[in-house]
Amino acid sequence: MDVAARVVADVTARERAILFSAPMVKAILAGRKTQTRRIVKPQPWPINDEERALGAPADSHWWPSNKCRSMVTINEMGALGPYGGRGDRLWVRETWGLLDTLPSDGPENATLFYKATDGERRDLRHQLWRPSLFMPRWAARIFLKITAVRVERLQDISEADARAEGVRPIFERFPEWSRDQRITSGELAADAEHRASFAVLWDELNGNRALWVTNPFVWVVSFERVETSRGEPSTFCLTAATLAARGPTRKCEGCGQTVAAGECCQHGVR
């Protein structure tokens, strides 16, 4: 099946960018990381008794969905979040570097470096690293396919899911810790070493937004890595005819292709 046919067959799919820190990039490349948790914004709020008396569902919380233009419950959130749903694609933004300038024959032939795997190279000690936030799609090397999305409380993470988050056991990270060390929510670290390690990592990355102890609602995105060559055009840069049913379209500033308004093409331009 050629690219055009695949695009038409997969017209409901989406492709989005997602940021990962260097340690998590290494975990993905090593095959240890197949899940990520991200804070739900805004946080769902409780359904009160008066709303239930008026016919609101028996679920415990509401969440405002822009896609549905209405309130939905936790069980209905699923693929309504910012990262997509099952079958959608993610391309990883990470800290990167570019040798000199873009070559005249196209960005796909540029010489790139990635801090997660190239940061210790002596020949790159003076390399100017570029923030992950500004990585364009043509520079990405890691592509993921979403296999499942759900919403849960942060502390509901199991030991198995903490392993899937790619973290090392807590006493491997902190060998000086005693076996009776507790994490901030009170549990013994020794009872679930990967879960404890994830709790510490969460606070390191998200301490200024939502600490582990506050137990926020999070998106749980499960994924698998897919092979895609760097510089390969995204099958999500669709033709105007294919996109007509989705509403407004626009031209990508990077490649001139027609993309859905508000969506990213291979250049990461919105």
Image (cartoon, rainbow, N blue to C red):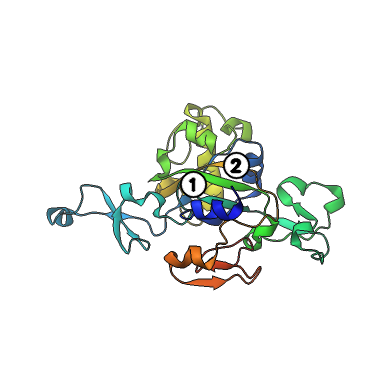
Q: Quadrant of the C terminus?
A: bottom right
Left or right: 60, with 232 as reference point? left
Which residue is painted at 35% across and 60% down in the image?
A: 65
Confirm whether residue 94 shows in the render: yes
- The one nearer the camera, 167 or 226, is 226
Mark 1 nearby-residue class (10 Å; few <14, some 14–19, many ≥20)? some
- The one nearer the camera, 184 or 242, is 242
Mark 2 nearby-residue class (10 Å; few <14, some 14–19, many ≥20)? some
Q: CA distance from mark 1 to mark 2?
A: 12 Å
Left or right: 69, with 31 as reference point? left
Left or right: 124, with 153 as reference point? right
* Place of residue 156 in the rendered image (x, y in percent of width and height, measured from the top left): 40, 39
Which residue is painted at 81% across and 58% down in the image?
A: 127
**Amino acid type indicated by mark 2:** Arg
Q: Quadrant of residue 105?
A: bottom right
Nearer the camera: disc 1 or disc 2 = 1
Left or right: 110, with 70 as reference point? right
- The one nearer the camera, 147 or 4, is 4
* Place of residue 111 in the rendered image (x, y in percent of width and height, measured from the top left): 80, 56
Determine whether 146 is above or below 15 in the image. Answer: above
Determine whether 167 is above or below 269 in the image. Answer: above
Q: Which residue is mark 2?
A: 225
Q: Which residue is mark 1?
A: 87
* Place of residue 210 in the rendered image (x, y in percent of width and height, measured from the top left): 46, 53
Which residue is painted at 52% across and 46% down in the image?
A: 202
**Amino acid type indicated by mark 1:** Gly
